[in-house]
């Protein structure tokens, strides 16, 4: 029944459970706005917040219990995890054991950046650049397939257009703008990804 601690995963603004709406009352729209989020509230009105974890729960749920349901795997790297960063010119992937990196592989590809007057035509330049990016992604994909076979789950972040080419290998993806040396960029992206936004309701 509605007593103790309420925890619910709200995947989108149109999927707010009735128990959450009743418990929050006038504040329910704030929970909708925070989605996708894990919403927590208690029957005494002391706690009411929405948390947007790095990895969302696998399915929606809404339950009362004597404590909030906040699983470590939603918020922190657990088990044997692969985490990769892929951009048009930069790639790196690490293997982590409970958050500690135990292996890393990465490379940078020189991709033509801009077209100047003279030399290549614009069309030829674009084709060459696309070919360079394609080769870069294919090389990264080979590495990712090996990592995928050796980890419990694989998270990939990077440029949206490039992620679409390797999304089928990942359990979760997200956009990231980390740049620079592949290994340093990977660490920046890893740190940014494993953060949780908390909204007071």
Image (spheres, grey):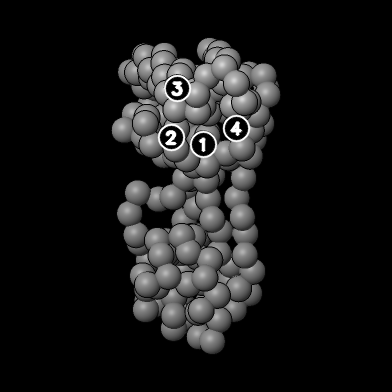
- Secondary element at image label 1: loop
| Residue 140, position as x, y percentages in the image | 44, 18
Q: Earlier in the sequence, mark 3 or mark 2?
A: 3
Instruction: Tell me whether the residue at label 2 lies in contact with that at label 1, contact meaning CB atoms closer than 8 angstroms.
Output: yes
Q: Quadrant of residue 172?
A: top left
User: Which residue in the structure is indicated by mark 1?
Assistant: 159
Q: Of residues 141 and 6, which is closer to you in this image?
A: 141
Whether residue 179 is situated above or below residue 192 in the rendered picture: above
* Of marks 1 and 3, the one in the foreground: 3
- Secondary element at image label 4: helix
Measured Cα–Cα span from mark 3 to mark 2:
25 Å
Q: Residue at x 44, y 38 (%)?
A: 161
User: Which residue in the structure is indicated by mark 3?
Assistant: 124
* Of marks 3 and 4, the one in the foreground: 3
Measured Cα–Cα span from mark 2 to mark 1:
6 Å
Q: Of residues 176 and 48, which is closer to you in this image?
A: 176
Measured Cα–Cα span from mark 1 to mark 3:
24 Å
Q: Residue at x 35, y 49 (%)?
A: 58
**Quarter of the image containing the N terminus?**
bottom left
Measured Cα–Cα span from mark 4 to mark 1:
15 Å
Q: Is residue 47 left or right of residue 12?
A: right
Instruction: Give the class, few, some or many, for how many residues have Cα within 10 Å of label 3's Cα (few <14, many ≥20).
Output: few
User: Which residue in the structure is indicated by mark 2?
Assistant: 163
Whether residue 7 is situated above or below residue 123 in the rendered picture: below
Q: Is residue 86 visible?
A: no
* Of marks 3 and 2, the one in the foreground: 3
Q: Earlier in the sequence, mark 1 or mark 3?
A: 3
User: Which residue in the structure is indicated by mark 4?
Assistant: 190
| Residue 200, position as x, y percentages in the image | 64, 69
| Residue 193, position as x, y percentages in the image | 58, 40
Labelled disc at residue 56: none
Measured Cα–Cα span from mark 4 to mark 2:
16 Å
């Amino acid at each position: 029944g509605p007593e103790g601690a309420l925890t619910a995963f709200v995947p989108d603004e149109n999927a707010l459970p009735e128990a959450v709406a009743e418990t929050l009352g006038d504040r329910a729209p704030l929970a909708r706005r925070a989605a996708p989020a894990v919403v927590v509230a208690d029957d005494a009105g002391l706690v009411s917040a929405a948390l947007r974890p790095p990895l969302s729960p696998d399915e929606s749920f809404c339950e009362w219990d004597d404590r909030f349901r906040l699983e470590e795997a939603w918020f922190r790297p657990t088990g044997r995890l692969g985490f990769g960063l892929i951009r048009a010119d930069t790639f790196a992937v690490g293997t982590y054991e409970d958050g500690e990196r135990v292996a890393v592989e990465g490379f940078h590809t020189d991709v033509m950046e801009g077209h100047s007057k003279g030399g290549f035509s614009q069309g030829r330049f674009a084709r060459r650049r696309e070919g360079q990016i394609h080769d870069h992604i294919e090389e990264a994909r080979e590495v990712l397939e090996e990592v995928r076979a050796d980890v419990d789950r694989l998270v990939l972040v990077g440029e949206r257009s490039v992620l679409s080419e390797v999304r089928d290998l990942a359990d979760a993806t997200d956009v990231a703008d980390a740049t620079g040396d592949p290994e340093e960029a990977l660490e920046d992206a890893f740190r940014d990804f494993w953060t949780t936004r908390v909204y007071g309701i």
